């Protein structure tokens, strides 16, 4: 099989210990030769320095890295400042998002949706950045309808995004259908599948409730039947997610983006089975 494009996402560590752990994780994952690493950005700029520091460190190690940038709560001036900083560090790719404000915070800011951020980045910086945006094969939880969400996605691409990365899912048909509909609506840019390895059933359930990703009933029941048997959960998760990745690649997915949660083992195991 031709090696597909793949990328790996981290979050910026908050402690010295987390930073050390991420360095070790990264060293292992770098052996897989991903196209780039990406680093998330806390909405409202809460991790701004951590995101930039992590990206800078990865780039110094000789790998490409993309900061995420979320606009919620931001002003034109604050976002312009961040873009200038990325440019000063010679960063040429980023993942542009609206973000979610932590509960208790108002929306505030001068950007309502990610398409406005993409437009702003293009207006301010021309073609300097390769911009990726988020896509939701199972619909973003706040969207009024799947069609509205698709329209919003298309608007975001038309604003100047180069590619998209999906929210994770465990239903390949939802992905294929979304890509087909996006293509019909004129989107020809790559829509890379976001992959969440399954390693911990409680954590997965919590994330999925927040972001609107469905865990199919049969997977949920299997996971709960394993109770605290972490080895069985991981072995089952590896089989299920690898089989889905094989299907996605065979069906034409242009790449895979792994939500690593700063852990190396699960992404490595899936990848080794794929190549
Ligand atoms: C690959 C990926 C990476 C992510 N990384 C981060 C990160 O680093 N930091 C972070 O905080 N979050 C991150 N997220 C989560 C993301 O910020 C949330 O899902 C957020 O709720 C939506 O962001 P968005 O960029 O998709 O928003 P948008 O594209 O703006 O969409 C948000 C909602 O508004 C609707 N909408 C869009 N435009 C309009 C319009 N003009 N009128 C009416 N409705 C509209 C959409 O249908 C959708 O329901 C990531 C998600 C993905 C898939």
Image (tube, rainbow, N blue to C red):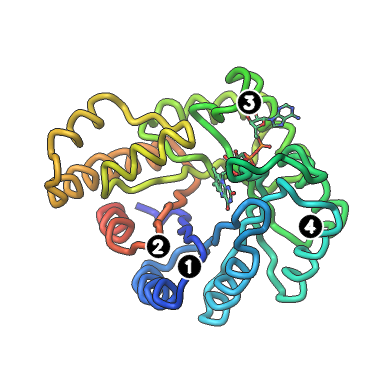
Q: Looking at the picture, does residue 238 appear above or below residue 252? A: below
| Mark earlier in primary sequence (1, 3) | 1
Q: Is mark 1 on a helix, strand or loop?
A: loop
Q: Tell me: is circle 3 under 8 Å from ligand 1.
A: yes
| Mark earlier in primary sequence (1, 2) | 1
Relative placement, left or right, of 110 versus 41 is: right
User: What residue did someone put label 1 on?
Assistant: 13
User: What residue did someone put label 2 on?
Assistant: 262
User: What residue did someone put label 4 on?
Assistant: 79
Q: Looking at the picture, does residue 166 appear above or below residue 6? A: above
Q: Which residue lies furthest to the bottom in this view?
A: 60
Crowding at dot 4, Cα within 10 Å, few <14 / some 14-19 / many 20+, comes out as many
| Mark earlier in primary sequence (2, 4) | 4
| Mark earlier in primary sequence (1, 4) | 1
Q: Is mark 4 on a helix, strand or loop?
A: helix
Q: Tell me: is circle 4 under 8 Å from ligand 1.
A: no
């Amino acid at each position: 099989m031709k090696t597909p494009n793949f990328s790996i996402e981290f979050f910026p560590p908050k402690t010295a210990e987390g930073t050390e752990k991420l360095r070790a994780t990264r060293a292992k994952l770098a052996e897989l030769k991903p196209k780039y690493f990406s680093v998330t950005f806390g909405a409202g700029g809460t991790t701004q320095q951590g995101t930039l520091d992590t990206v800078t460190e990865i780039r110094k190690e000789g790998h490409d890295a993309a900061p995420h940038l979320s606009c919620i709560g931001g002003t034109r001036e604050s976002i312009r400042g961040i873009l200038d900083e990325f440019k000063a560090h010679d960063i040429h790719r980023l993942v542009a998002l609206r973000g979610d404000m932590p509960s208790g915070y108002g929306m505030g800011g001068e950007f309502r949706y990610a398409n406005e951020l993409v437009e702003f980045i293009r207006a301010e910086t021309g073609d300097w950045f390769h911009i990726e945006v988020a896509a939701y094969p199972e619909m973003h939880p706040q969207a009024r309808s799947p069609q509205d969400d698709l329209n919003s996605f298309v608007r975001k691409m038309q604003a100047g995004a180069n590619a998209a990365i999906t929210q994770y899912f465990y239903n390949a048909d939802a992905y294929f259908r979304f890509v087909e509909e996006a293509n019909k609506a004129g989107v020809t840019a790559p829509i890379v599948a976001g992959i969440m390895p399954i390693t911990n059933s409680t954590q997965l359930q919590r994330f999925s409730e927040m972001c609107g990703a469905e865990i199919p009933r049969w997977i949920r029941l299997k996971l709960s039947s394993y109770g605290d048997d972490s080895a069985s959960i991981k072995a089952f998760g590896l089989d299920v997610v690898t089989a889905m990745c094989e299907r996605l690649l065979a069906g034409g997915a242009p790449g895979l983006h792994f939500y690593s949660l700063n852990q190396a083992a699960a992404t490595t195991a899936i990848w080794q089975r794929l190549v």
